[in-house]
Image (tube, rainbow, N blue to C red):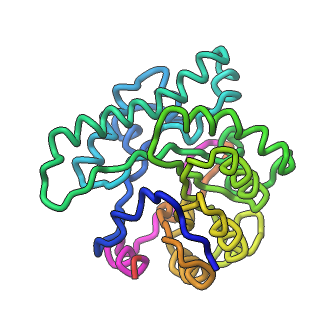
Amino acid sequence: MTPPAVDDPLRPFLSAPEGLVLDGGLATELERKGFDLAHPLWSARLLREGPVAIAAVHRTYLEAGADCITTASYQGTIEGFRREGATAAEAAALLRLSVSLALTVRDAFWAEAGREPNRLRPLVAASVGPYGAYLADGSEYTGEYDRDEAGLVAFHRDRMHLLLDAGPDLLACETIPSAKEARALARLLAERPEARAWVSFSCRDGSRLCDGTPFADSVRAMAEAPQVVAVGVNCTAPSHVGELLRAAAAVTTKPLVAYPNSGETYDAATKVWRGLCDPADWGARGRAWRA
């Protein structure tokens, strides 16, 4: 039996017919504004070079109706910032900034929009991307890592604690390609009993994580952690999402999360997506995933 989550920040949203609506791609919107994100830090690069632009995208998503905005920390890590010339103190400050930016935008928006009928105050989720995002070699889509579970715990620990200390509503542990990385994150959540998180996996098909682990097994394992308030799939081809959600629903009663990519394939050498977008009706698919 799945244990209940305590103080679940998602619960107030889930009684609504549409569930909780996430924001969209931060990097996608920044690129549309002309920013070059072909860089090892991806959108986290702008925490140093253009935080105002990040804040503007957060605001746009809230105005479009998002119930939750996600911080620009997906590819931001202590090691990654230091590799680009930041000191350890500067790197820590940039991670905290990713959360404070989103909180400030959310609070300003809510001060203006909070009297809208039936609208709940949007959430801020601090993004915890996978180890492969730091490597910037595409391994978040393979799970082929050079670290064991203990090494992944050590890699994620400082960032996770810094993000939690900055005060988000919850963590978004996202695009997790391997079972051992999910276990590492669960161990770190246990170090902070007040923390809440969703965990979403990147998958190679309709039944397996990118590292080949059965998706249902990983969902079951993560859903057993009381601090994990939702579990699901992201950055995966939309054609696989329905099958993956059905598999998840068979092994947990916790809420499911889904935010796929457009169906293209990531080219790690050029750091661009290749191929064609899935031509599906996103509205129809969204309703099917909700069901």
Q: Residue 22, located in which quarter of the rendered image?
A: bottom left
Please tell me which residue is depicted at 53% across the width and 51% down the height of the picture. 172
Asked if 94 appears above or below 112 in the picture, the reply is above
Q: Is residue 45 magenta?
A: no
The reply, left or right, for residue 73 in relation to residue 33 is right
Left or right: residue 130 compared with residue 240: right
Query: Where 94 sits versus 85, above or below?
Result: below
Q: Is 31 rendered above or below residue 208?
A: above
Picture quadrant of residue 93: top right
Q: Residue at x 40, y 64 (%)?
A: 11
Q: Picture coordinates of residue 110 (x, y %)?
A: 22, 42
Choose between 13 and 61: the one closer to the eye.
13
Asked whether, in this view, residue 170 is left or right of residue 189, the answer is left
Q: Is residue 272 magenta?
A: yes
- Numbered marks: total: 0
Quarter of the picture containing the C terminus is: bottom left
**Image location of residue 12, percent across then percent down:** 34, 63
| Extent of the magenta region | 270-289
Of the pair 235 and 290, the residue shown nearer to us: 290
Percent coordinates x, y for residue 141 in the rendering: 68, 56
| Side of 216 relative to 108 (left or right) | right
Residue at (60% x, 43% y) in the render: 271
**What is the x, y in percent for residue 109?**
22, 40
Q: Residue drawn at (56%, 48%), measured in percent from left and top?
A: 195
Q: Quadrant of the N terminus?
A: bottom right
